[in-house]
Amino acid sequence: MIREFLKKNNFPNTYDSFIKEDTREKVTMTKNELTRLLGIDALMKRNAKNKAFTTMLDMICDFLMLSKEATNGVSYPKTSSIQITESKMESSEEKKTMKKDVV
């Protein structure tokens, strides 16, 4: 998403620096796979109709800003990727509680 944002918003030097400095393992994922993983199918469909945003990052940022304004925070959608994150957070909290009990 970052590469797409930099390319489409005409930041060639920043894009080149990002590519040079990015030492992560290269993962190939299609836009459709990323959309499903993030659970943003509805946002993508809405944007396909009105073409308000040129990048996924712009679209997600806009959604988060609107959510923050509307709810005084961000509500997380109940998708598999978020549930995994929540369960990891819960198990982390359980470990902390268990450590406190042991000590």
Image (cartoon, rainbow, N blue to C red):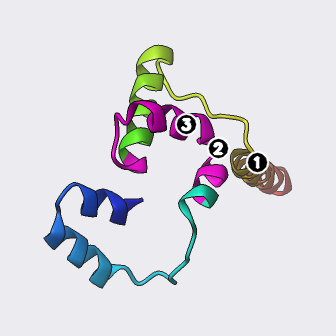
Q: Which residue is mark 2?
A: 39
Magenta segment range? Answer: 34-57
At a point 73% along the width and 36% down the height, the residue shown is 78
Badge number at residue 29: none
Badge number at residue 80: 1
Badge number at residue 45: 3
Q: Amino acid at mark 3?
A: Lys
**Image x and y of residue 60, in percent:** 45, 41
At a point 17% along the width and 60% down the height, the residue shown is 10
User: Seen in the image, is 17 located left or right of residue 46?
Assistant: left
Label 1, secondary structure: give it.
helix
Query: Pointer 1 and pointer 2: residues touching (CB < 8 Å)?
Result: yes
**Image x and y of residue 63, in percent:** 45, 31
In the rendered view, tell whether residue 78 sits above or below residue 15: above
The span from disc 3 to disc 2 (Cα, nearest Å) is: 12 Å
Kindly report the secondary structure that dominates the magenta region of the rendered protein.
helix
The span from disc 1 to disc 2 (Cα, nearest Å) is: 8 Å
Q: Quadrant of the N terminus?
A: bottom left
